Amino acid sequence: MIEVTRDTSAYTNPYHQTVVVPPQKHTRRNIIISIVAIIVVAAIGVLVIQQVKHAQLVNSVKDALISQNDIMKKSAKEGAYSATLPNGIGSTKDVAIAATVSFDGTTYCITGKSLIDDTLVYNIGSHSVDNIPVDGDCSSLTNTIIPTTPSAPSVGSVGTDDVSLTWTKSAYAGSYIARCATDASFTKDVVSVTSQAPAVVVNKLRTGVEYYCNVQAVNERGKSQWSGATTTKTSLASAAPVITVTPVSTSEMSYSWTPISGATAYELEYSSDISFVKDVKKLTTQATTGRTTGLSAGTTYYYHVRAFTGQFDASTAAFSGVVEDKTKS
């Protein structure tokens, strides 16, 4: 038996092919896109979380203010609010609260600031619409609400031609006008001064004169009513002696007055005219007693005297009260 062996090495299977897998050209780009997508999603998530937290903080401030506002409204009596804040008005663990009431009790404002994010500041009060807080603290309302009426001013130092005044700060005030006049109707000798602060010195007043002073608050929206008036009197230029006169004869009158500490000289004026306009005689002396001569018999004469010191001269020294007597006939 003959065995035949076939040599297949010379043949090639026409159906056999070597498959070459092409390189993955887009793999790196897909990885980058995936990473970017993850970052974007994460950023959006962070942003959403921040917005939610911000909204929660805003709501915490507004809720606190609405609660405080309800307390203020309930505390009102006959439409007026007490300057002494009611119980319950105060800061919370998350919100700092500050409240102000106008001097006349007609308006109030409450500021709330987040203790977690101090950029979140809102206010609410008698000016609010539908009990809704608005952005900003109470001072931000300066140009949107007419100021409340200030308190009647208090008198500080008083000079010969000026007086210092202070008053309670007015809600929503941008500035103040203080005025003084010699009559309660503020029509005579009116002197006005503008101030940014609730304090001012009104000068160019008359010496030894009683004045009425009051204050008005101003902002861009308008002016408040004038406050109640306070009375004060400017100082005399200096301490004046107390003088007495006595007839001596038909042509002489003796005089004397109380000495003034620090006086360097005295000026005596006497005349038969009570207004000291006509027939006025003047005498400068360092003595406090003496006589006037050359007078007319049986005539009434009027006397007053002033003291000159190192501080007060002829332009500022005050005359005493006027005394009178009649020479012998």
Image (cartoon, rainbow, N blue to C red):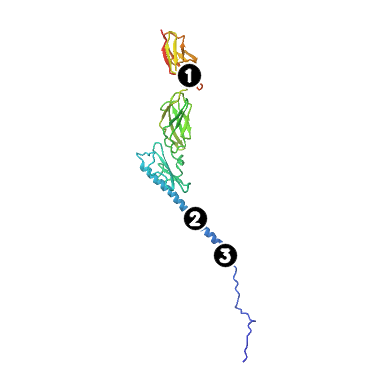
**Residue that numbered label 3 is attached to:** 27
Which quadrant, please, contains the C terminus? top left
Q: Secondary structure at mark 2?
A: helix
The label on residue 12 is: none
Which of the two discs, 2 and 1, sits closer to the camera? Answer: 1
Please tell me which of labels 2 and 1 falls first in the chain.
2
Please tell me which of labels 1 and 3 falls first in the chain.
3
Q: Position of residue 168 (x, y in %)?
A: 43, 35
Nearest to the observer: residue 98 or residue 145 = 98
Nearest to the observer: residue 140 or residue 251 = 251
Mark 1 to mark 3 CA distance (whole Å): 109 Å
Name the residue type under label 3.
Thr
Query: Is any part of residue 38 visible from this angle?
Result: yes
Q: Are the residues flagged by discs 2 and 1 in contact, CB closer than 8 Å? A: no
Q: Secondary structure at mark 3?
A: helix
Mark 2 to mark 3 CA distance (whole Å): 29 Å
Q: Position of residue 14 (x, y in %)?
A: 61, 79
Nearest to the observer: residue 94 or residue 243 = 243
Please tell me which of labels 2 and 3 falls first in the chain.
3
Name the residue type under label 1.
Ala
Q: Secondary structure at mark 1?
A: strand
**Residue that numbered label 1 is attached to:** 307
Q: Residue at x 36, y 42 (%)?
A: 75
Query: Is any part of residue 130 visible from this angle?
Result: no
The label on residue 46 is: 2
Which of the two discs, 1 and 3, sits closer to the camera? Answer: 1
